[in-house]
Image (spheres, coloured by chain):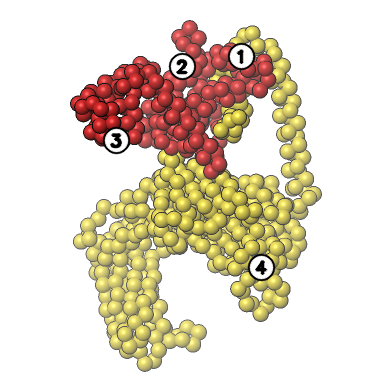
Chain colours: A red, B yellow
Amino acid sequence: MGRFWRRRSDEELLGLTGRDRTAFGVFYERHEPALLGFFGRATRSAEVAADLTAETFAAALASREQFDPERGTARMWLFGIARNVLAGSVRRGRVDDEARRRLALEPLVIDDAQLVAIGDLIEREGEQMVAELLGGLPEDQAAAVRAHVLEDRSYLEIARELRCSEAVVRKRVSRGLSRLRRRVSEETT
Amino acid sequence: MTYLPDLKRQLVDAVPAAPGSRRGSRWRGRGRALRGVRLVVVLALVLALLTAVALAASGVIEIGSPVKTPSYAPSLSTPDRGMGAVVPGSVRLLVAGIPDPAGGPPWGMRAFKTTRGLECVQVCRVVDGRLGLLGQDGIAGDDGRFHPLPLRVLDQWDCAPGDARGHAFIAITQHDAYASGPSGSRRCSMPGEHDPHKTTRCPAADQRLLVYGLLGPAARQLTYRGADRRDRAIAPSRPDGAYLIVLPDRARLGGIGVGTLPGGPPVRSYRYDNGLVCRASGPRCGPVGYVAPRPPHVTPAEVRAPITVHVSHGQRDGVAITGVELTFAAPVAITNAATSYVATAQLPAACGGTMFSSGSTANLRRGARVRIRLGVPVGARCHGRVSGRVELQTPTGKPSAGLILPPTLTRSSSLTVGTFSVPIG
């Protein structure tokens, strides 16, 4: 990727796509890992994540003229499409392929090595997301949520370690999860 | 670095075709100029392609006479009998451009539908969009020409009944093919073949392993182990899920495996749109997208009909034959090759207790007179009663697993029309 393209914003890349197809390739490379991670977390499947990513980018390419910079960033617009693709696929019980068919794209062929790489990416993205989310909680709540939800330890066990009552641990986990729910909800609407 | 470079390439290639690419006034003039350049490139490619086609048709490969139709081939001309007639406009090339390990014209697969609800596939070499055999490996006197393949040159296992939506599921692994193309009529002997009239053996280096079939409309990807022992992934063509793999056949055993789904090497796995991955050597899995045909709405009582039995005696090729002819009025109409009346008879225990069966092979209206003839070879000392039953067999449920021969592709449901028992000898 040349320096010219690296310096272009997402919004500029979308605007330049009609003039030079390289622009959309750069836009694709910039957001592919995040979309794969997003779908991987939602579906727990590298293959389905790859399919959903393909459909999202195809839909973005087909509707790029509808992108309006005044309504938000290109990344927000792309993830809006991603959420619609995911919701539509869940509703129909299969991965949408309408946009790919409109663009006459061939079915995606993924080999085992690619699946492993995507699986690793999803895991990394997942760990990073967890770290970011827990980082936004007060320390005592983050510790309680990590111990109970991620490490699957009992309230009693955590209470003994933290030298507090079991009721306190329950309250910290409950408050921590409520706060996380609010944050995730705000980010995805 | 991208995780899905093929997707990126396809998206970038699709940019000119994407809605909106003609918009954007600032770049319109330049866009036209670029399109002009692209048009010149496209025209050059078309010219090059036409030149290649002309060379293939007239110079490089000479076209010979069509392949002779063997005596056992289906007629494909009677719409309501046997395999039926070819449905006009249904012949299509599903897969093309599969290279042969030794080069030459590529391989391809075509399919067509018949009026009795069958889907048939043929695999051969492709020249100028036509399927045919090459004059080598004991074909056409090894004349080196390309011999177009008529639709009738096919075996029973190349056809299978479609499901409720007309999609067929076929998986064939053929070991007795050669670089010329698959054929049961070659002048050289194949592995395991002991024909005294064939004095030369077919060249072992030309033996090919053909793996092909129809995985259905929901098939997304098939992975197989190539000749270099590396796994490769291919995308079956839509909407049939058609795939074709051509490899040098190192096993050189001959034989053919027929089923509804790939059942082992070289196929490793296949994947569907819904993410389901099936291991070819694993437990039964799929087919996704199969819609079971609706069986006729009849009760067992409605299928019952009186059967008239007539016994005759004769000889065929010096062997005593007892003919058991069954006639009855069809209680249910027959409209396709997957549904039929089947008669099964069992010889007396003193004669070995062998089972024989035969069935109707044509469409029938309800009430039409059905005649099924069972030829039972019996010796002079065979006495007793032949007993049996007539059943209406209709496809239902899931396709059968394992190696089976179409048109009994799907598990059949049987309703008894009647039973019989007659003395012989």
Q: Are marks 2 and 1 in contact (CB under 8 Å)?
A: no
Task: Calculate the distance from the C-alpha at mark 2 to the C-alpha at mark 4.
Answer: 65 Å
Question: Which of the numbered marks, if any, corresponds to residue A153?
Answer: 3
**Label 3 packing within 10 angstroms: few (<14), some (14-19), many (20+):** some
- In the image, what residue type sits under mark 4? Arg
Point out residue A179 in the picture as x, y percentages from the top left corner. 30, 19
From the viewer's perspective, is residue B321 above or below residue B287?
below
Earlier along the polypeptide chain: callout 2 or callout 1?
Answer: 1
Classify residue B203 as left or right of residue B212: right
For label 2, the SS is helix
**What is the chain letter for disc 1?**
A
Task: Calculate the distance from the C-alpha at mark 3 to the C-alpha at mark 1.
Answer: 48 Å
Whether residue B237 appears in this view of the structure is no
**What is the chain letter for disc 4?**
B
Q: Are marks 3 and 4 in contact (CB under 8 Å)?
A: no
Image quarter where the N terminus of chain B lies is top right
Earlier along the polypeptide chain: callout 3 or callout 2?
Answer: 2
Task: Calculate the distance from the C-alpha at mark 2 to the C-alpha at mark 1.
Answer: 17 Å
- Residue corresponding to mark 2: A76
Q: How many marks?
A: 4
Say if labels 1 and 4 share a chain.
no
Circle 3 or circle 1, nearest the eye:
3
Task: Say which of A42 and A68 sits in front.
Answer: A42
Circle 3 or circle 2, nearest the eye:
3
Question: Which of the numbered marks, if any, corresponds to residue A8?
Answer: 1
